[in-house]
Image (spheres, rainbow, N blue to C red):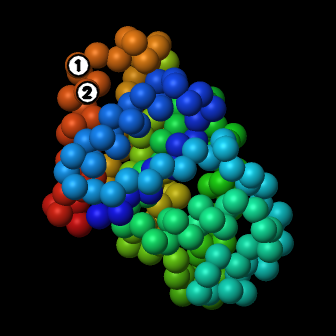
C-alpha cells in the first residue's frame, strides 16, 4: 500500500513529528511504502473561492499554480492519506488548514447532486497530539475530520489522538503501544 503522510505541524522535531515517525516506521515494517510531505515546507496559498476548479472533473482544476497541485497529485496516487498535526485551538493548525481548504478542487458535482472525488474511497487517517485531554479539547477535530472525509467521499479508517503531550522525551511506552495498534488498524483489510 502507498501511504502519503501529510505533516501539518510547524515543529519538525516536536511531539507530532516524533509520533508520526513512529507510525511511519510501523507502516514500513509492515511492508507499506510511506512518503511524507511537510506542509510547512511547501508554498500553498489559501483558496480563492473562485470555483473555477468545479469545471474540471478529471484533475485538480485549481487556477493557482503552487505546491498544492503537487500534493494533490501525490494524494491521488496514494492508497492511504495520513493527516497529522498538533492540536491548535481545538482544530487544525493554519499550516494544514490552508491545504485542507484547497481540497475543494478535488471534488466536483455537489452542485448537481452527483458528487465525485479524485480521492473517492481512498483511506484517510488522522494523527493528533495535544497538551490537554481528549474530552472537551481534541474531540472537535475528530468530528471535523469525519465530516471532511465524508465531503471528499473518502474512507476514514482510524484516528490516533495522543493527549497530554508535553515534550517528545515524555512520550512513553503507552504512546508506542498506541502507535503500533493504530498502524495495524489503518492498513488492515478489516478497515475496508
| 139 w.r.t. 6: above or below | above
Which image quadrant is residue 168 in? Answer: top left
Which image quadrant is residue 182 in? Answer: top left
Rendering coords of residue 5 (x, y %): 45, 50
Q: CA distance from mark 2 to mark 1?
A: 5 Å
Residue 15 numbered mark, or none: none
Q: Nearer the viewer, residue 171 or 35?
A: 35
Residue 76 appears in the rendering: yes
Residue at 49 percent across and 18 percent down: it is 131
Q: Nearer the viewer, residue 47 or 132?
A: 47
Residue 173 numbered mark, or none: 1
Element type at mark 2: helix
Question: Quadrant where the C terminus lies?
Answer: bottom left
Residue 150 placement, left or right of 42: left
Residue at 25 percent across and 42 percent down: it is 26
Element type at mark 1: helix
Rendering coords of residue 108 (x, y %): 61, 81
Residue 148 placement, left or right of 184: right
| 40 w.r.t. 76: above or below | above
Please, which residue is most extreme toward the left here?
A: 190
Q: Which residue is mark 2?
A: 176
Residue at 52 percent across and 77 percent down: it is 117
Residue at 60 percent across and 73 percent down: it is 106
Q: How many marks?
A: 2
Q: Residues within 10 Å of mark 1 (few under 14, many from 20)?
A: few
Q: Nearer the viewer, residue 106 or 146?
A: 106
Residue 139 appears in the rendering: no
Residue 105 placement, left or right of 50: left
| 94 w.r.t. 145: above or below | above
Rendering coords of residue 44 (x, y %): 73, 54
The answer to whether marks 2 and 1 mark residues whose Cβ atoms lie closer than 8 Å is yes
Amino acid at each position: 500500500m502507498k501511504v502519503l503522510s501529510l505533516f501539518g505541524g510547524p515543529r519538525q522535531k516536536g511531539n507530532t513529528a516524533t509520533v508520526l515517525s513512529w507510525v511511519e516506521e510501523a507502516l514500513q515494517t509492515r511492508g507499506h511504502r510511506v512518503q511524507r510531505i511537510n506542509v510547512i515546507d511547501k508554498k500553498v496559498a489559501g483558496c480563492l473561492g473562485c470555483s473555477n476548479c468545479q469545471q474540471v472533473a478529471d484533475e485538480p482544476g485549481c487556477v493557482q499554480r503552487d505546491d498544492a497541485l503537487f500534493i494533490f497529485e501525490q494524494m491521488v496516487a496514494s492508497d492511504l492519506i495520513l493527516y497529522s498535526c498538533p492540536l491548535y485551538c481545538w482544530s487544525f493548525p493554519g499550516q494544514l488548514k490552508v491545504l485542507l481548504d484547497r481540497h475543494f478542487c478535488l471534488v466536483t458535482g455537489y452542485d448537481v447532486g452527483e458528487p465525485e472525488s479524485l480521492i473517492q474511497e481512498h483511506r484517510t487517517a488522522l494523527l493528533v497530539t495535544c497538551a490537554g485531554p481528549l474530552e472537551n479539547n481534541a474531540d472537535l477535530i475528530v468530528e471535523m475530520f469525519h465530516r471532511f472525509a465524508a465531503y471528499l467521499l473518502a474512507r476514514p479508517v482510524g484516528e490516533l489522538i495522543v493527549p497530554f503531550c508535553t515534550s517528545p522525551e515524555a512520550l512513553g511506552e503507552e504512546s508506542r503501544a498506541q502507535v503500533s495498534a493504530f498502524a495495524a488498524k489503518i492498513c488492515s483489510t478489516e478497515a475496508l
